């Protein structure tokens, strides 16, 4: 696979393409400096535009439509949330050989989440819980239903074959029997029976930003929708340790069934991620390995 690509059939982009697109469609921004942004994100190529903007271009066909989704829903969600989220500024159209819509966003300062960048993991867990509670309380009228849009807030049974296959592919890298036990427990947990709520859908370390050690923003809402919020609990194992994970759970007042489904989702996402991105996304793979390690540590503790 060519250097810098994460998918065999992804569309190539570079700063020159971004400049040409801007010159043709948003000439008032075309003279600003453009620089690629290193990111473990898998679906979009990012370029910083000047000091306070970013350009986002889908890499792969399944990310098409995400920019339009952001334009529709992020302005509705933002006023209700206690942390910053992306602010879409403009929608670009296909041109210059680039086949899809693309977007210009306000630049959000901060660094991606790692435990060593968090001053106080318990405070971060509490801040994230406050964000998720606020998100789940927003009116869902007209929101994209997970069951209709193939999003993560649906029954884990829809991921069973892919998850078992991914766990088997990790034989020799992880304790397969323990992983399957976690997955089976998640499948057997009662389903979400309350009204569907808003969820982020891809709450991973790479989608949290920290400034001066404190959680400041949540980014990349392409997977957002309305359904079972257990998928957003992936971050409990993806970022936090046992003690701060319990802080998150207590702040959210999560019941046993939802916690089990969340743990299963964390395992499923990480197990599927590793074989696909093993040679192309070292940061994402490292995050996924850590998530599985935390999930299995929980299993041993139980």
Image: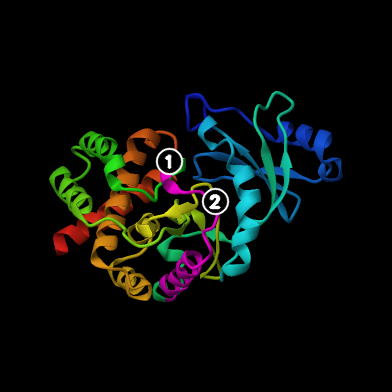
Frontmost residue, 264 versus 29: 264
Tell me where residue 281 sits by quadrant. top left
Q: Secondary structure at mark 2?
A: loop
Q: Residue furthest right?
A: 28
Classify 23 as above or below 254: above
Where is residue 271 drawn, in percent x and y?
30, 42
Q: Secondary structure at mark 1?
A: loop
Q: Considering the image in quadrants, where does the C terminus appear? A: bottom left
Which residue is denoted by mark 1 in the rendering? 150
CA gap between label 2 and label 1 equals 17 Å
Classify 205 as above or below 240: above
Name the residue: 29% across, 61% down.
258
Where is residue 185 drawn, in percent x and y?
18, 53
Give left or right: position of 53 versus 8.
right
CB-based contact (under 8 Å), mark 2 and mark 1:
no
Badge 1 density bin: few <14, some 14–19, many ≥20, Cα 10 Å: few
Is 136 contained in the magenta span?
Answer: yes
Name the residue: 44% across, 35% down.
280
Name the residue: 22% across, 53% down.
186
Where is residue 105 drawn, in percent x and y?
69, 51
Looking at the image, can residue 109 be seen?
no
**Residue bounds of the magenta highlight:** 123-147
Name the residue: 37% across, 36% down.
278
Looking at the image, can residue 90 be seen?
yes
Which residue is denoted by mark 2 in the rendering? 220
Where is residue 214 drawn, in percent x and y?
52, 71
Give left or right: position of 90 versus 239.
right
Badge 2 density bin: few <14, some 14–19, many ≥20, Cα 10 Å: many
Q: How was the colour assigned to the protein in this rendering?
A: rainbow
């Amino acid at each position: 696979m060519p250097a810098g690509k994460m998918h065999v059939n992804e569309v190539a982009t570079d700063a020159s393409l971004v400049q040409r697109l801007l010159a043709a469609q948003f000439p008032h921004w075309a003279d600003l400096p453009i620089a690629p942004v290193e990111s473990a994100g898998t679906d979009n190529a990012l370029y910083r535009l000047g000091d306070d903007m970013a350009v986002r271009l889908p890499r792969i066909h399944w990310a098409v439509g995400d920019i339009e989704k952001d334009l529709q829903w992020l302005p509705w969600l933002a006023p209700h949330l206690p942390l910053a989220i992306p602010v879409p500024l403009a929608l670009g159209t296909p041109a210059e050989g680039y086949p899809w819509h693309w977007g210009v966003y306000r630049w959000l300062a901060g660094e991606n989440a790692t435990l060593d960048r968090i001053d106080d993991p318990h405070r971060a867990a509490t801040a994230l819980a406050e964000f998720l509670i606020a998100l789940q309380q927003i009116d869902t009228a007209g929101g994209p239903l997970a069951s209709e849009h193939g999003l993560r807030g649906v029954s884990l049974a829809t991921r069973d074959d892919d998850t078992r296959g991914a766990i088997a592919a990790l034989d020799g890298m992880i304790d397969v029997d323990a992983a399957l036990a976690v997955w089976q427990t998640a499948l057997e947990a009662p389903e979400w029976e309350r009204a569907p709520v808003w969820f982020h859908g891809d709450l991973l370390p790479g989608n949290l930003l920290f400034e001066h050690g404190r959680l400041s923003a949540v980014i990349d809402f392409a997977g957002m929708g309305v359904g079972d919020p257990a998928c957003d609990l992936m971050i409990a194992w993806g970022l936090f340790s046992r003690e701060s994970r319990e802080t998150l759970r207590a702040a959210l007042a999560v019941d046993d069934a939802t916690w089990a489904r969340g743990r299963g989702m964390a395992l499923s996402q990480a197990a599927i991620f590793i074989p696909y991105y093993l040679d192309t996304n070292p940061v994402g793979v490292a995050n996924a390995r850590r998530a599985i390690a935390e999930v299995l540590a929980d299993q041993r503790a139980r």
